[in-house]
Amino acid sequence: METGNSSPTLPDPSEDKKPGTTAIDTAAQRLEHEQRIDKLRQTIKWVVYSLLMVNWGYYIFDDWRVAQHTVAEGASLAEWMNAFATSLDELAWFAMLFLFEAETYWLDDEAMTKLKRLAFVILRFFCYGFLAHTVYAYSFDYQEITHTVLLPAINSACDLVGQDFSFVRNLAYTTIDATTCNVVGAGSSFYQIGDSQVVTDLAGVDEMILLYYIDIQDAIVWLGVVLIIEVVVMLQEKGISEGPLITACNWATFVLYGVLICHALLWAWKGHWVYGWDQLLWIGGFAAIEMNLSEWRDDLIEEAAPT
């Protein structure tokens, strides 16, 4: 594999050039231009990666905030992992991004020893384990919200004051106390979510079913994106740069990114601007990997071209 740091092939001296310009001058100008383009791409890429790190810090804080309402004292490790599913998911995606960046840009074929390939496989195994856990955690949340229990003999949220209950609507949690009980919920029907001390009203149940469903779908679609990249990397490592399978992968990736953009727009519409922004940043991060693959593919095509 040729990496993004490889030098471009010098042009044929017989190529057209401006009067008074030698082939060496033309090659030097082209090299300088490609170096500027590569520097710009790398700058944009690392700005995106840096912004994703900032977002990860926000998700850790947000998961902790929600856990204060959803995780009971003495909870198990599995319950805490479910509570921090988003933060763990982001960590796994950072690792996957690093691995793909190393494979498609930093390292060439000679640098990829058997030991390094084994290390990559082991790291990927753990990453996919965390990503699969995210799908499980979101599915667990969906299962809980679809099996809510109507609290009996409750006329208003004020009947729950002093029982450590919280009210949730659109993923925003409010502790129910004498000050807030008159302003949370609509109607006199309140539903308890699983075994937690969290309640919502009927509209809140419907809303959270939609949001949790999108979470599950989003996690699965992202797994589809990364599996397609795995296939393309495997093909290009074998020297395959064209053909129906490469074309199918490109179109499938295009469709999956379209679904992910729709998710980002939905979250923004629901007022979750950070979620939508984070989604677009991750699309940008993996678009950088796609760009690395495209450059690698061009190198393969050029190497295979008759001289």
Image: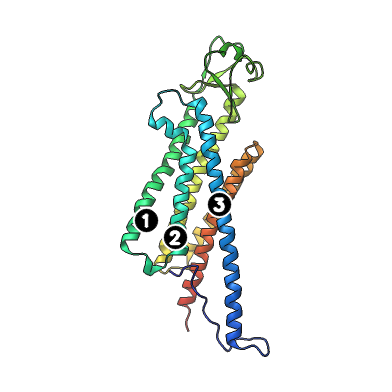
Q: Amino acid at mark 2?
A: Ala
In the image, residue 79 lies at what x, y percent? 42, 30
Q: CA distance from mark 3 to mark 2?
A: 17 Å
- Decide which of tag 3 and tag 2 comes sooner along the chain: 3
* 237 relative to 141, above or below: below
Distance between mark 3 and mark 1 Cα atoms = 23 Å
Front in this rendered view, residue 95 or 204:
95
Q: Please, what secondary structure does the residue beneath circle 1 have?
A: helix
**CA–CA distance between discs 1 and 2?**
10 Å
- Is 114 left or right of 54, judged from the image as shown? left
- Mark 1 is surrounded, within 10 Å at the Cα level, by few (under 14), some (14 to 19) or many (20 or more) other residues, namely some
Instruction: List the residue tagged with mark 2.
Output: 102
* Residue sitting nearer the eye, 72 or 141: 72
* Quarter of the figure with the N terminus: bottom left
Q: Is 47 positioned to the left or the right of 115 in the image? A: right
First in sequence: mark 3 vs mark 1: 3
Q: Which residue is mark 3?
A: 50
**Residue type marked 1:** Phe
| Mark 2 surroundings: few (<14), some (14-19) or many (≥20) residues within 10 A | some
Q: Tell me, for residue 12, which label it has, or none.
A: none
Q: Which residue is mark 1?
A: 120
- Residue 271 against residue 100 in the figure, above or below: above
Q: Farthest residue toward the right? A: 19
Q: Position of residue 122 (x, y in %)?
A: 34, 52
What residue sits 60% from the left and 22% below the top? 202
Q: Marks 2 and 1: in contact by CB < 8 Å?
A: yes
Going by the numbered disc 3, the residue's amino acid type is Ser
User: Mark 3: few, some, or many residues within 10 Å (few <14, many ≥20)?
Assistant: few
Mark 2: secondary structure: helix
